[in-house]
Amino acid sequence: MKVLVLCALLCFGGSLAASVSTSGVVVCYYGEWSNERTGNGRFGVSDLPTDLCTHIVYSFLLLNGTTGGIIAPEETTYEGKTNTVADLIALKETNADLKILVAIGGWTEGSTNFTAVVNNDTLRADFVSNLYNYIDSNGFDGLDVDWEYPAQRGGADTDKEQFVTLIKELKEAFAAKSYLLTAAVAVTQSHIDLSYNVTQLNEYLDYIHLMTYDLHGTWDTVTGVNAPLYAQLTDDSSVNLNVNNSVHVWINNGATPSKLVLGLGAYGKTFTLTSLNDTSTGAPFTGAGAAGPYVAEAGVYSYYEICEDQKYNATQWNITEVEGSYVYANKDLFWVGYDNPNTIKAKAQYAKTMGLGGIMYWAVDLDDFNGLCGDKYPLISAGIAGYNSS
Ligand SMILES: *[C@@H]1O[C@H](CO)[C@@H](O)[C@H](O)[C@H]1NC(C)=O
Ligand SMILES: *[C@@H]1O[C@H](CO)[C@@H](O)[C@H](O)[C@H]1NC(C)=O
Ligand SMILES: *[C@@H]1O[C@H](CO)[C@@H](O)[C@H](O)[C@H]1NC(C)=O
Ligand SMILES: *[C@@H]1O[C@H](CO)[C@@H](O)[C@H](O)[C@H]1NC(C)=O
Ligand SMILES: *[C@@H]1O[C@H](CO)[C@@H](O)[C@H](O)[C@H]1NC(C)=O
């Protein structure tokens, strides 16, 4: 295995703001459909690291745009692994401090049902009370709203304002039992302009989960890593797609740093290179990388799919780590841009240095939860170490 370490402008993190002394939240999104994966990919409630995560976010409820009703995922059990809500909530018996939230929405849900509901006072009131009842009757600690994104992807112009109305009404409904209310949000200024009134959301939300990943992918014209902390070495100065810029954007628009939670991707974005003449970021590609053996999605490799292939085919991989910012690697024409424990640690240190409330993972089921490549949960452990070390 050839490993090249480049030191970007700031190997160790840049300007140091006042650091906070409390240890932060560790928010672990849990995609319940990971129960459907096969072999070492199959993930169940019993795999959740209740000693590492402070918050688990069960994903996703969907919604009925005609009624304001909510649609819960199918409960499944395979080979002794299960995704049931009852088993999930029972984890609180072994860790009384663990908070378990449920998320509604997600990329696939999109906007149209949210738009239909939030812009109608009757449907919105029903939606709020349906959500409250679902949380209350199942024993969840709160709700994470994952509308991707207000006034985009088929939404309406009024969504930006009505999203605030929804969040405000949820906060009021949740007050009686102090249920937590959080949201997952997009992270560029153009998304904020379209979708979010940051000062208003900041007032009502307990935490704002920054989706600081998916910054590059096959929609681009050249290769790029999933979530570079700082600009990629090949970016020209007009490109501002990096984690650092996203955090500054949310703070500059009025978010309280301690309410912001830094999103970390436990996966990489994959491409098929045009040729081996250019294997860096900014290289031409012909399409998505082929699907991996477990997650089975073209263009995406979980961290455990990356590390397992690198472990068993070590001599075939060229790996380049731009220290403290990102990693990219290729095996022949297969290219992946991702995070390893070093870059995750650097990002978590950055989160602490910026005074953020903690770190968040998409998703707990994509880290090396079996320990296929070493210790279990290397990325979550590295993030906690990073946050606590600065
Ligand atoms: C939404 O609710 C309506 C009325 O109860 C029902 O007919 C419809 O099937 C529901 N849609 C979904 C997707 O569940
Ligand atoms: C709402 O959600 C349902 C099921 O999730 C989906 O079939 C439908 O297309 C969505 N949109 C609208 C406008 O109902
Ligand atoms: C709001 O939704 C209710 C229930 O579906 C419907 O009866 C009413 O016409 C809707 N109001 C508007 C303004 O669309
Ligand atoms: C946010 O909402 C407040 C209260 O309605 C309003 O005064 C402010 O102009 C809004 N800000 C943005 C950026 O839309
Ligand atoms: C981080 O972002 C801020 C705001 O855009 C910028 O001033 C700073 O130079 C960035 N840091 C690095 C190392 O790029």
Image: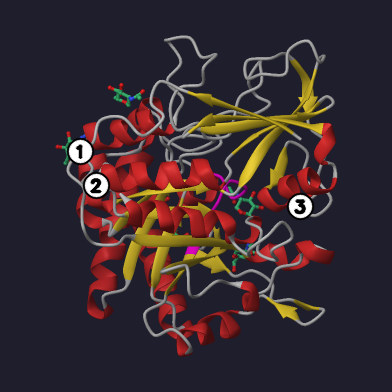
Give the image location of residue 203, x and y in percent: 19, 52
| Count of numbered tags | 3
Give the image location of residue 118, x and y in percent: 39, 52
Q: Main secondary structure of the magenta part?
A: loop
In the image, is residue 340 above or below residue 69?
above
Mark 2: secondary structure: loop
Mark whose residue sits in front, 2 or 1? 1
Which disc, if any, is residue 355? Answer: 2
Give the image location of residue 356, x and y in percent: 28, 48
Which disc, if any, is residue 295? Answer: 3
* Picture quadrant of residue 49: bottom right
In the image, is residue 137 above or below residue 243?
below
Residue found 38% across the figure and 59% down from its top: 124
Given the image, on which type of amino acid does mark 3 rest? Val
Mark 1: secondary structure: loop
Label 3 CA crowd tier, 10 Å (few <14, some 14–19, many 20+)? many
Q: Name the residue carrying label 1.
A: 17
